[in-house]
Image (cartoon, rainbow, N blue to C red):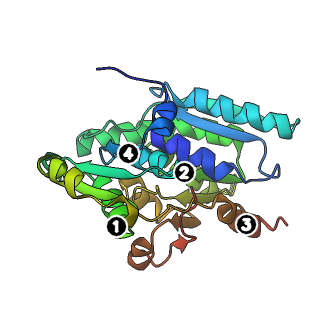
Amino acid sequence: VRFKDSLAEDLQSADLIISHAGAGSCLETLEKGKPLIVVINDKLMDNHQLELAKQLHRDGYVLYCNCSTLVETLQSMDLSTLKPFPPGQPEKFASFLDKVFGFQ
Amino acid sequence: TGGHTTEILRLLSCLSESYSPRHYVLADSDKMSEAKIRSFEQKRAETFSKSQFTLDRIPRSREVRQSWISSVLTTLYSILYSLPLTYKRKPDLILCNGPGTCVPICISAFLLGLLRIKRTIIVYVESICRVETLSLSGKILYYFSDYFIVQWPDLKKKYPKSVYLGRIV
């Protein structure tokens, strides 16, 4: 098994990403504005990581399939249906905490 | 660990220097988070020269899929281990986002609060991975935290005492 410290370079130069449902992988890809197909491992159905992949799919940010339907998905996909992923807003968290402590 | 560290550093990214010094607590088995934290703090020191932080390690409270009974024992051990650390730091705020490591720290702070030694505000932010269900840490700390923040509306509905600010990482 090969490991890299960071996939950032590979993500940047790719046109399409096919990934497992790990949150880090999904978010890193979406933040780079790359189209993403998430492949679900049917044998890990209990895995809570599915929750995020399903929600991202419901919201129209990713395509979604399992190992056996991957080829069909690749053949029939329309990437233009994917919506751009808005970044998270840590500034809202900072404002919230500032209010809790009375900082301006 | 891993994803939790990335998320918590993003949460810290917009905080002012009022939130200083920062005391990071890691599991003793965590090899990768220290580098991420040092890198974050190094960048921060470029903007805020008086920026301060510390790093402590505690025994990991629970391994993935560890049995219930042994988890209770290892968590109790971690709570006892955390008490002197929390007593020494006496934090005004504990910010955590779900790794098992945070439960003993929060419980130790809660106990110090009951004993009137130090009142710490506990803010828990559930991971962005949690859309429909809470993590085990979340289920426990929902009752011990002062503010419990969720990042998806379904969880706000299920846990009405939680705070929903949208996606914050």
Asked if A17 appears above or below B146 in the picture, the reply is above
Q: Chain of mark 2?
A: B
Q: Please state which of residues A18 and B151 is positioned toward the viewer in this rendering.
A: A18
Q: Mark 3 belongs to which amino acid?
A: Ser
Could you confirm whether marks 2 and 3 are on the same chain?
Answer: no
Closer to the camera: disc 2 or disc 3?
3
Identify the image quadrant of the C terminus of chain B: bottom right
Disc 2 residue crowd, few under 14, some 14–19, many 20+, Cα 10 Å: many
Pointer 3 or 4: first along the chain: 4
Q: Residue at x 63, y 57 (%)?
A: B113
Q: Tell me the chain of label 4.
A: A
Q: Chain of mark 3?
A: A
Q: Which residue: 81% across, 68% down?
A: A102
x, y percentage for residue B150? Answer: 49, 66
Q: Where does the image place residue A35, in percent across and percent down from the top left?
A: 40, 52
Disc 2 versus disc 4: nearer the observer: 4
User: Which residue does the numbered mark 2 point to in the structure image?
Assistant: B106
Res A95 label: 3
Instruction: Tell me the residue that label 4 is attached to.
Output: A16
Q: Secondary structure at mark 1?
A: loop
Percent x, y of residue A70: 18, 49
Q: Is residue B53 visible?
A: no
How far across and down, in percent of the image, does residue B48 sit?
Answer: 86, 40
Q: Can you say whether B69 is above or below A97 in the image? A: above
Q: Nearer the viewer, residue A20 or B26?
A: A20
Which marked residue is nearer to the observer: mark 2 or mark 1? 1
Amino acid residing under circle 1: Glu
Q: Residue at x 58, y 47 (%)?
A: B8
